Amino acid sequence: LDDQLPNKSWSRQFLPHQALEVGSIFAGLKMLEDPRAVKILESWAQIFWEHLTQLNERASECRSPERTVHALRELLAAQEYLSQPVLPRLSEHHPGLMEFDFQVFVAQTKEQVVKQLADLSQKVVEKRRQSPSEAPEMWQKLQELCKSTELNELLEKELEQCFLKQPLFKAFIPEQTEIDGLKARITNGSSPEDFGPDLLVLARSLESCGDFASQLA
């Protein structure tokens, strides 16, 4: 087993070639019906469970696009290569694996990533209500995550639309009727004292939307 999975790593770079071999080794250990073999299976079941839970945690933390994408891809590789040859041989040796469903686990992990992005989006909006320059690192992190092509593909969502444009526009941009009314006052020759305060509010709102303000129709 140590030869097949160096450093007890379930990395996807080994899985396509090693999964069947590792599964056969586990199957052989189960047939031995020896206490020492059971201990080996229990040990590897624990390692396998820790690998899965760590991937879930790394993905759902959303620290960076690269880290999140890597964890999701590793998890999908585990689902593809380990669900049949390995999981059935280890499931009875760890409580977390007894009724484990890879498809459900992957779906739940993706949902956690989406929830984390939604939470981060809400925090960004709250900070930018105070000032457009508030929490620049949080703002940058959210943009990087949402603009990741790989992350958009893995989650099957338009992240930029869901967690940047829509929340920002909803929070800061007035209704179109208000904007049209302001335009009318300006073009109809109203005094700056009349439309100035509302124009200033609109300008600050657009500033809070960052680069996305230019995408308003």
Image (cartoon, rainbow, N blue to C red):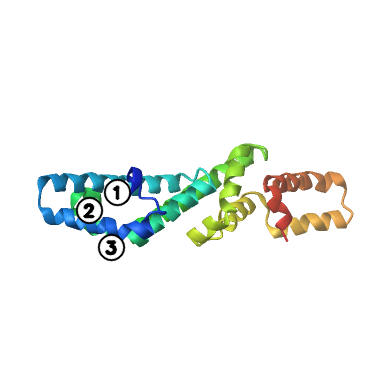
Residue 125, quarter of the rendered image: top right
Crowding at dot 1, Cα within 10 Å, few <14 / some 14-19 / many 20+, comes out as: many
Q: Give above or below for 21 relative to 38.
A: below
Disc 1 is placed on an element classified as helix
For the residues labelled 2 and 3, the Cα–Cα distance comes to 11 Å
Q: Residue at x 43, y 45 (%)?
A: 58
Q: Is residue 145 left or right of residue 55?
A: right
Q: Which residue is mark 2?
A: 90
Q: Give above or below for 8 relative to 177.
A: above
**Image x and y of residue 206, in percent:** 72, 48
Tell me, for residue 12, which label it has, or none.
none
Disc 2 is placed on an element classified as helix
Tell me, for residue 48, which label it has, or none.
1
Q: Is residue 79 visible in the rendered structure shown here? A: no
Q: Is residue 141 left or right of residue 207?
A: left
Of the image marks 1 and 3, the number of the one nearer the N terminus: 1
Circles 1 and 3 in contact, beta carbons < 8 Å = no
The disc labelled 3 sits on which kind of residue?
Answer: Gln
Q: Which residue is mark 3?
A: 84
Crowding at dot 2, Cα within 10 Å, few <14 / some 14-19 / many 20+, comes out as: many
- Of residue 183 and residue 141, the one placed in the foreground of this image is 141
Q: Residue at x 48, y 49 (%)?
A: 68
**Image x and y of residue 57, in percent:** 40, 45
- Of residue 197 and residue 158, the one placed in the foreground of this image is 158
Circles 2 and 1 in contact, beta carbons < 8 Å = yes
Crowding at dot 3, Cα within 10 Å, few <14 / some 14-19 / many 20+, comes out as: few
